[in-house]
Amino acid sequence: MSEILLQLNREMAAIVEHVRPSLVQLRHGRRGLGAGTVWQADGLIVTNAHVVRQHAPQATLADGRTVSTQVVALDTAHDLAVLSVAAVGLTAATLADAQNVEPMPEPRRAGRGGTNPGPKNPARARQNPDLISPPATDHGTLPNLRFSFDDSHIRLESGGWTRQVTQRELGISKNIAGVNMRLNAGGVRELHWHKAAEWAYMLYGTLRITAVDNDGRNFVDDVGVGDLWYFPSGIPHSIQ
C-alpha cells in the first residue's frame, strides 16, 4: 500500500474512533438497519427519514444499551428525522464551524504548480500559506526567519523547564537567541550571567528578580504578567 493510502487509512481510523461514542444503530425489530448521531447529550438523535419509516426504531447506543426512541420531527422532503431517547451518559457529536476553517493551501497558482498528495502537515501549511504557494515575486532566496519553540528540545528539571532557539536551530539568528522558561512555585534560576545582554517579558505568574553589578550595587524587584526586565552583559542575576 502506498504511503498516501496508509496516511489516509490512519486519518480515517482516527476520525472513526473520535465519532464512535456519538453513533447509534437503529432497528425496526429484526428488520431494517440504519445509523444515527447523538446531537445533544440529553437524548436528541439525528438520522434519515427513510430509516424511521413512520415508526420509532430501537436504538443501540455505543456502550451496547438498547433503548426505545420517540419521533420528534420528520422531514421526508429532505430525508431528515429527529428522535429522542430517555438515556443518560450520551456523548454528543462535536461540531466544527465550517466558516472558521481555513482552506488548505496548495502549491499552485494560475497555470503553475499542482496539488499536493502528501505527506502534509495541515497545521503548518495553514500557518505558512505563502511558503506553500509563494507569490510570483518570491524567488526563494530569503533565508528562514522563524523557528517555533514547539520544535525545540525542552530540558526538564525539578524546578520547571526551559527551551531555546539559538543559531543552531535558526541559522540566520547570529546575534540574538530566544529562551522560553517555566519556573514552578519555589523554583529558582540560580545566580548567573551572560556575555550577551538579557531582555525578558513575563507571560504568566509572578516572580522575583535580583541583580548585582561590578560595584556591589544590588537590585531586587517583583514582576508579573506584562512586565519587562533588562540585564546588561555580564551582570549577575537570579530569577525565582
Image (tube, rainbow, N blue to C red):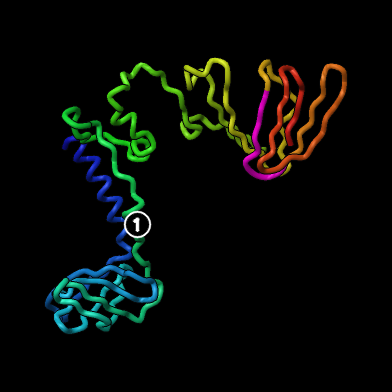
The percent position of residue 191, horizontal first and vertical second, equals 76, 26
- Check if residue 192 falls in the magenta segment: no
Q: Quadrant of the C terminus?
A: top right
- Check if residue 205 falls in the magenta segment: yes
Question: Which residue ends up furthest to the front in the rendered image?
Answer: 137
Q: Quadrant of residue 229?
A: top right
The percent position of residue 142, horizontal first and vertical second, equals 39, 18
Which residue is at the front of the view, 148 or 144? Answer: 144
Q: Which residue is mark 1?
A: 96
Q: Give the magenta range.
A: 198-206
Q: What residue lies at 71% left-to-right and 27% top-to-bottom? A: 230
Which residue is at the front of the view, 152 or 99? Answer: 99
Q: Quadrant of residue 186?
A: top right
- Name the residue type under label 1: Ala
Neighbour tally class for label 1: few under 14, some 14-19, many 20 plus, Cα within 10 Å? few
Q: What residue lies at 37% left-to-right and 36% top-to-bottom? A: 124
> In the figure, 151 relative to 39: above or below?
above
Q: Quadrant of the N terminus?
A: top left
